[in-house]
Image: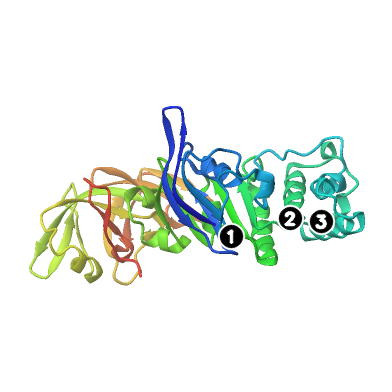
Amino acid sequence: LNIQDLHKYYGENHVVKGIDLEIPEGEFIVLVGRSGCGKSTLLRTIAGLEHVDQGTIEIAGQVVNDMAPKDRDIAMVFQNYALYPYMTVYDNIAFGLRVRKFPEAEIRQKVQRAAEMLAIDHLLNRYPRQMSGGQLQRVAIGRAVVRNARLYLFDEPLSNLDAQLRDEMRGEIKRLHRELGKTIIYVTHDQIEAMTLADRIVLMRGGRIEQQGAPLQLFEHPATRYVAGFLGSPTMNFIPAQLDRQGETMSLLLQGGVALPLPDEHVGALASWGGRSVLLGLRPEHMQRPGSPGAVTISVQVELVQPTGPRTYIEFSLGGMSAVAEVGAHDVHRAGERINLALDMQRAIIVDPETERVVSSGAN
């Protein structure tokens, strides 16, 4: 799939703004972003459900801008299952093949194979009203799988499921991609889905691509504050600071008199930034109890304790801002405690507050 300078308008509303995107065969791409960023509209233009106002979409080297959806060799799975309630599971999966006049023996073979892949082969005689949400979504995916299409498009297929079912279905979809070896473009607003499923994440904002790359690349080396804040849960802490350079060393000065020495990874990138105001970005998991080599230890007073089972999230004040750290389950017992935290400055990012661009990321 090759998309060049793609634009989409709804009246005066410019929804997709000059997207360039190339997707090689067999890749699992996740389009992610907050509601209204243009990700579903982009998917629908690829599918042919929306008209392209400017730019080109090529599938296998052929421009498909004016091609009907049925001729694009794509299969699509929607947020709502869109199953025929009066048909059995078998007939729902087989429907598209029958429309295309496949022989019944071949249809039977394809349906059985897809049902086995999705562990619904024992449900083929049931009707949609007799099934759970997770089972219904498997049927919808099975209907797409039997198509043996060139492109598979998923539009927030798991958003109607509860948390446990979403976890199960993510694993099923990833396993399905490995077995099929087909190109998948998957839309979600859930950054956990994006991180766990994607070969490559395309993070969108305001109709444009903010950053794209492998999940860990975006997580550890975000290009902007927006990317850094979007990926990760709880979200990254951003603390105003001032860079202070003394000879070959550099520190971040926070409100309240806290000074955080910067490791060499940052000093080189920030050589010309001495005295300037910046934002320090630190993820909750990079603020632990002391013991990490090379970390900077500070004393904080815990204001809020949120146990989750294996880990505990604590809130405290740092540099005049509310911050969150992730500590061990039994490291803190109640609000009001004063504890030492080790800040892993090698994993910190430094953001220019004017442009919101990341000017230094220390993670390897």
Residue at 38% from the left image edge and 62% from the top image edge: 220
Q: Which of marks 1 and 2 is nearer the N terminus?
A: 1
- What amino acid is at disc 2? Val
Secondary structure found at label 1? loop
The residue under label 3 is: 115
- What amino acid is at disc 3? Ala
Q: Distance between the residues labelled 1 and 2?
A: 19 Å
Q: Where is residue 341 in the image (x, y as percent from the top left)?
A: 32, 58
Q: Which part of the image, by quadrant, shows the C terminus?
A: bottom left
Characterize the local packing of mark 2: few (<14), some (14-19) or many (20 or more) Cα atoms within 10 angstroms.
Answer: many
- What amino acid is at disc 1? Ala
Viewer-closest of 175 and 150: 150
Vertical order, 125 against 179 (above or below) = above
Q: Do the residues labelled 1 and 2 touch (CB within 8 Å)?
A: no
Residue at 92% from the left image edge and 58% from the top image edge: 105
Characterize the local packing of mark 1: few (<14), some (14-19) or many (20 or more) Cα atoms within 10 angstroms.
Answer: few
- Residue 68: in sight, yes or no? yes
Q: Distance between the residues labelled 3 and 1?
A: 29 Å
Image quadrant in which you'd find residue 102: bottom right
